[in-house]
Amino acid sequence: MKKYGVFFMPHPPILIHAIGNGKEQESRSTLEGMSNLAKAIQLEKPDTIIFISPHGNSFSNGTCILYSDELYGDFSDFGNRETMFHKSVNKDLAMNIFNRLEDAFITVVLMDQKTAKQYGVKVQLDHGVMVPMHFIDEHYSQYKVVHITPGFTDLEENYRIGKLIDEAISNSEEKILIVCSGDLSHALSDEGPYQYHPEGKTFDEVVRHSIENGDPLSLLSLSNHIIEEAAQCGLRSFLMGFGAMDGVHFESKVLSYEGPFGVGYLTGMLMKSEQTKESFIQVMKEQKQSQYTERTNNEDQYITLARKTIEEYVRTGKRLNLEYVKEHFTEEFFNNGISKRSGVFVSIHKGGKLRGCIGTISAVADHLIDEIIYNSISASSNDTRFDAISKEELMDLEIKVDILFEQEAIHSKKELDVKKYGVIVEKGAKRGLLLPNLEGIDDVEQQVSIAMQKAGIDHEEGMKLYRFEVERHEI
């Protein structure tokens, strides 16, 4: 087992004098913290530094690892071309990490020049790396790099990625450490880039205390509401850093925290020991199993049918058959399900975020049970906005089933109610639907506008409106 450090460093370009032009002095605590971390790194004299930055090539569904012989970058985006960086890449380590993520069924892109051209992105250093690098290089610059950008995936996955990074480090003969780049809330005041929100302070306090106390659980337990309102960019980088410490005791320390310019800046570190402890990943697995059991125990048979369908299809590629439903569901549910026909929408969420949603406006199957089965498979595997759901995700899914009542034509938007009625818009061959009572849809104008976008309808002239109610099954 290797002892090494994880260093938390913010990345505001204004900290660099050539960009800040003296304004950086308003962040003296941060400047001192960055300098002290750089000196600590100098003492370690690492062969390679793994930089984890949120501002590289970021994807909604996976992690990005840059793969090139050399990486270059400068601050021309911030009016300074003179401050430039050039580092060799530890390609063996980058490939090792990539392979470990792939073996763990974690979505990851190894971004070389050819792949970058396909995605329309660049293989280069970003300011999330270059700002910490600037301070480090003032004291020590003879190191290779690995550049990793977290995706907008669930928090637990980023923690597990950190654990896999640690395994790659432990497999190497070189001296390696990790720099987790990230700013905290950008909503601490109206002076910042985002409007002030009280959850910004809440978020920063949680992050600060988690590092002071060596407690990743408090980060993993943050609600989506707090994370989104805080307008932060460092959480997933920091969780990878904590994940690298999984299963061992470590010392943790916050060197500085302040919030100038309405943005939270924190410097801190974790230092790994050789003393082992229980893996937190195992604790998370047990918690996930408990949550899954509680969730499924509270689901009605409509949701259970959708869940069983998804689980069977994802695991085996096979469709749930009618005999299984007859054997494992109540007689009343089965008889009711094969005697009715209706349109159905199946919505899948994971970690509070949409993971798939597909449905039928009116019945296409012979009966309701088949309609639910058909749309459950489609929502989990055929929603083109998302990758198909994997086996590793099955225990995290929250499922909702909407059974649609008959639609009725209406003459005006005044006949709509976003809580009670869904809406269908139709113009020629174009048709779009939006379900009722959706989070974030607060008025009729918004509801109709989104339905029109889905249909590809630009103007209301000549457009027909329909409304419908649903029987919603959710917990």
Image (cartoon, rainbow, N blue to C red):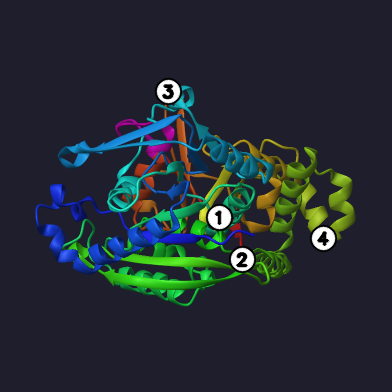
Q: Quadrant of the C terminus?
A: bottom right
Residue range in magenta is: 452-463
Q: Name the residue under label 3.
A: 117
Q: Disc 2 vs disc 1: which is toward the camera?
A: 1
Residue at the image position 40 percent from the left and 48 percent from the top: 53
Q: What residue type is labelled 2?
A: Ile
Mark-to-mark CA distance, 4 and 1: 49 Å
Percent of width and height locating residue 141: 35, 46
Q: Name the residue under label 2.
A: 475
Question: Which secondary structure type mostly characterizes the magenta part of the structure?
Answer: loop
Q: Disc 4 vs disc 3: which is toward the camera?
A: 3
Q: Disc 4 vs disc 2: which is toward the camera?
A: 2
Residues at badges 2 and 1 in contact (C-beta under 8 Å)?
no
**Residues packed near mark 3 inside 10 Å, few (<14), some (14 to 19) or many (20 plus):** few
Query: What is the secondary structure assignment of the residue under circle 3?
Result: helix
Q: Is residue 306 above or below residue 226?
A: above
Residues at badges 4 and 2 in contact (C-beta under 8 Å)?
no
Q: Name the residue under label 4.
A: 332
Mark 2 or 1 closer to N-term?
A: 1
Mark 4 or 3 closer to N-term?
A: 3
Q: Which amino acid does label 1 sit on?
A: Gly
Q: What residue type is labelled 3?
A: Lys
Q: Is residue 163 found left or right of 341 in the rendered image? A: left
- The residue lying toward the viewer, choosing from 367 and 42, is 42
Q: Which amino acid does label 4 sit on?
A: Glu
Query: What is the secondary structure assignment of the residue under circle 1?
Result: helix
Q: Name the residue under label 1.
A: 162
